[in-house]
């Protein structure tokens, strides 16, 4: 049974984003926050700080080491609406914490998520779950409609100061920035955007920590265009293609098997990402 209305599906196809959707009640939200607190205690620092100074892997794919994050990846309230957009056979291939500390300059410049994923076709849905209020003061997402014509834009990476994104990337082509749509979320809500939807977010000027978890879903028919076979986890339906190395959710929080699986999965993802980043730079370079 479809969860999205025909009007919502039409808006998705025209704009590339939909928001907001209800998800977590107070108890579920507290479970996620408590789980994040335990994880950061294990790390010895906030996720975003240790990622900036030590290793990006700790903000990536928490569904392989944290059962509460895996629970979100399999949540039918999320998957029901994702299925309406990409079909019944669904993989999650990565996931990322997007955290901005109070009164921090952390931003995301205009970018498209799929630029460095190396996916073919670029059919991907990012579900952005707010674990704290992500209002405009806290630096919520702003999106631009792709007006029914999703296509890849040229980016340059490693140039954006205080970027919340792995590659510190920004779109280099002219954009009509006059009509951005703010997508504020209350804690426990989520938004969705297509991998080719241009979006950004401003600094956190609020007094609270802005905590978001992005979950990246693809249909099982999508493949990696590069030379490396990364991992993905089947969260709904059947995978008849086997384009990705399969991984499973953790049996316990931060157990040895989960940590080993996370180590391998994030390493493969990093290799794929860097390969796609290099290829995009070559394609975008002027002749």
Image (cartoon, rainbow, N blue to C red):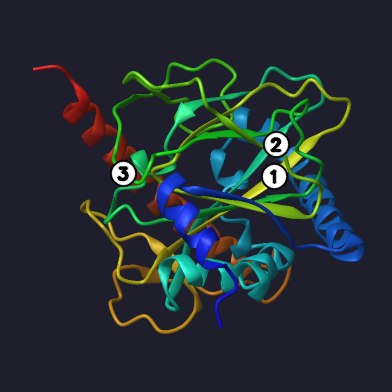
The image position of residue 203, as x and y in percent, is 69, 21
Counting residues from the start of the chain, the first of labels 1 and 2 encountered is 2
Residue that appears at 33% across and 38% down: 274
Counting residues from the start of the chain, the first of labels 2 and 3 encountered is 2
Counting residues from the start of the chain, the first of labels 1 and 3 encountered is 3
- Nearer-the-camera pick, 58 or 217: 217
Q: Which residue is mark 1?
A: 212
Residue that appears at 65% across and 62% down: 65
Mark 1 to mark 3 CA distance (whole Å): 28 Å
Q: Which residue is mark 3?
A: 149
The image position of residue 24, as x and y in percent, is 80, 62
Res. 177 visible in picture: yes
Mark 1–mark 2 CB contact (< 8 Å) = yes
Looking at the rendered structure, the secondary structure element under dot 3 is loop
- Nearer-the-camera pick, 6 or 144: 6
Looking at the rendered structure, the secondary structure element under dot 2 is strand
The image position of residue 173, as x and y in percent, is 31, 21
Q: Which residue is mark 2?
A: 99
């Amino acid at each position: 049974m479809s969860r999205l209305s025909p009007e919502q599906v039409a808006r998705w196809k025209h704009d590339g984003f939909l928001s907001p959707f209800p998800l977590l009640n107070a108890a579920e939200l507290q479970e996620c926050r408590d789980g994040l607190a335990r994880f950061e205690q294990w790390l010895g620092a906030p996720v975003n700080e240790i990622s900036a100074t030590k290793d990006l892997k700790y903000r990536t794919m928490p569904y392989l080491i944290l059962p509460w994050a895996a629970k979100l990846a399999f949540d039918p309230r999320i998957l029901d609406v994702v299925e309406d957009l990409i079909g019944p056979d669904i993989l999650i291939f990565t996931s990322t914490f997007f955290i901005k500390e109070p009164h921090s300059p952390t931003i995301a410049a205009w970018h498209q998520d799929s630029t460095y994923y190396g996916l073919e076709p670029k059919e991907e849905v990012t579900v952005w779950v707010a674990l704290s209020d992500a209002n405009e003061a806290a630096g919520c997402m702003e999106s631009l409609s792709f007006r029914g014509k999703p296509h890849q834009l040229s980016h340059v990476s490693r140039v954006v100061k205080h970027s919340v994104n792995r590659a510190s990337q920004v779109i280099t082509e002219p954009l009509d920035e006059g009509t951005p749509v703010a997508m504020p979320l209350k804690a426990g809500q989520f938004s969705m955007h297509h991998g080719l939807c241009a979006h950004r977010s401003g600094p956190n000027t609020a007094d609270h920590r802005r905590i978001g978890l992005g979950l990246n879903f693809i249909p099982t028919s999508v493949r990696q265009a590069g030379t490396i076979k990364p991992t993905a986890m089947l969260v709904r339906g059947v995978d008849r293609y086997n384009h990705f190395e399969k991984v499973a959710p953790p049996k316990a929080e931060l157990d040895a098997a989960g940590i080993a699986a996370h180590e391998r999965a994030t390493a493969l993802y990093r290799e794929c990402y860097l390969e796609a980043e290099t290829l995009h730079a070559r394609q975008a370079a002027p002749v």
